[in-house]
Amino acid sequence: MDDSLEKPTAISQPSNQEEREEEDQSSGDEDQGPDWTKLPYGSISRPVIPKRGEKEFEPSTAGGSGLQRHVLDRARSAMLDALSAPRTISSKSISYGVWYPEIARTHVTLGKGIHFATMGHSVARASTEEDDAKKVQKRLELLPEEALYLVERGGMLCWKSADLSIAATPGLDDVEGVPMTVQQAFAEMIGKEDLTLEKYQVFAYLKRLGYSVTRAKPPTPEYPSPPALSTGRERPTSVFARIRTLLLAFWRLLHLIPRKLDWWRPLRRCGWLNHMDNRSIFSSLRFLPSGHDVPLHVKGIPGSLLSPYEIFFNLYKPSTPFKKTAPPPPDFSVVVVNARTTPMPSLTELTNLFGTLPELSPPIPRKRQSFAQQKAAAANTPPQAPPPPVPPPPVASEPLLQRLLPWFFPPPPTGHPARNPNPFLSLKTGKKMIVIAAVDAGTISFFRFGQGVFTEWSMA
């Protein structure tokens, strides 16, 4: 205890105004609740977050006094009034759409805002008017998760298509259906087009973070999809390339023939190839096949249900240039599962997922520089003149065998040699990657699984 507080005196201590302001602004303590009574009553133009206030009294077994109960009831009624206040939205940024349950799509009749730069797709539909029944016109349609996201966040008012004649009603001549609430939108759209509550929660969470999210499997032919990428298993189309593949496969098959292994002399040396390096030495010491090209000996259970581990969303970073009519290759592939009903993925399920993904290029090593160093380098860098043209290198004479069989030898590399990637970063990232979103009663956890490249990087 301080000496000034041990002996009280009649002289008042001068108060520090700055300390009082800091105490008033420090509202981050977890043991203090928000003071709902300080919210302004009536309509307000913008939402106000209440600050945390001090506790009026400590709870006791005998109960509080009448004044304490009155203060608690007033705070509780203020909280209920604040939560029951109607949610207001601006009419200048609201969009309008019509939900068609038979096709599970929402037709955007009036689109406003920046959300439609990454959501929605154009579809040619027959005109709904009687005069233009045979006319086909394009319109913007939303998937169930896209429409539900806009309705939930207050960016779109949605109507349900109905066969009611309400055009003669004053003020409803331009309405094409029945207005839908948020609760009705959840009841109508969840369950359509393979959309579950867990998948919508993941979609809404990623959209709030700024990601662009699309379906991995197009629900209709009109839905835009990224270009198909190489999965590393395509067969060569050229005849000479097929011959070369067969010869290489035959050479690997010779090495797989079981031989009598002398454990005291495990190294095998060919009589006409006496060159031995680290890679060949460790290959000779390996007596079990390794790598992801080796087929699995685990067989699936006959009559089992379909695996829940299927890629459902394609994910794009906010910094990735995205065009919804021609989306680029995705940055991540996301699988959504229910954590309470789905077990951990098996080795067969992970292998099937990796079999549908393209191989990633090795990551480029980064030069670690501080922000001050980057700023100084950008300020001191003079404008560089265009480099002089590099003369072509002299053409070396090719061997006779290479001139006779040019298709058997790979072409020489052109340009500057590529920088060697960091092996540890490649081992951490892998050549294929999948993201699994496990939803546990609304709590979303993301797990990344990668296909390692340990057999492709020799550490010795």
Image (spheres, rainbow, N blue to C red):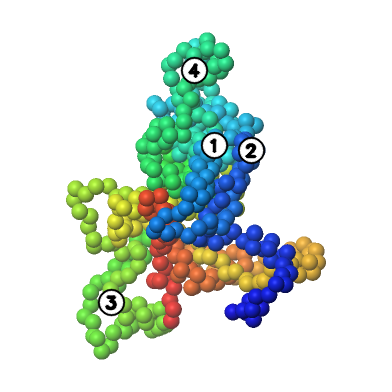
Compare residues 322 and 26 and report the one nearer the observer.
Answer: 26
- Disc 2 to disc 1, how far (Cα)? 10 Å
Q: Earlier in the sequence, mark 3 or mark 2?
A: 2
Compare residues 453 and 49 and report the one nearer the observer.
Answer: 49
Quick check: 328 left or right of 90?
left
Q: Which residue is mark 2?
A: 44
Amino acid marked by disc 1: Ala
Q: Earlier in the sequence, mark 2 or mark 1?
A: 2
Compare residues 102 and 380 and report the one nearer the observer.
Answer: 102
- Camera-near label (4 vs 3) is 4
Q: Is residue 405 visible to the viewer in this orientation of the structure? A: no
Q: Which residue is mark 1?
A: 85
Q: Which residue is mark 3?
A: 287
* Residue displayed at 27% across by 62% down: 296
Q: Earlier in the sequence, mark 4 or mark 3?
A: 4
Amino acid marked by disc 3: Phe
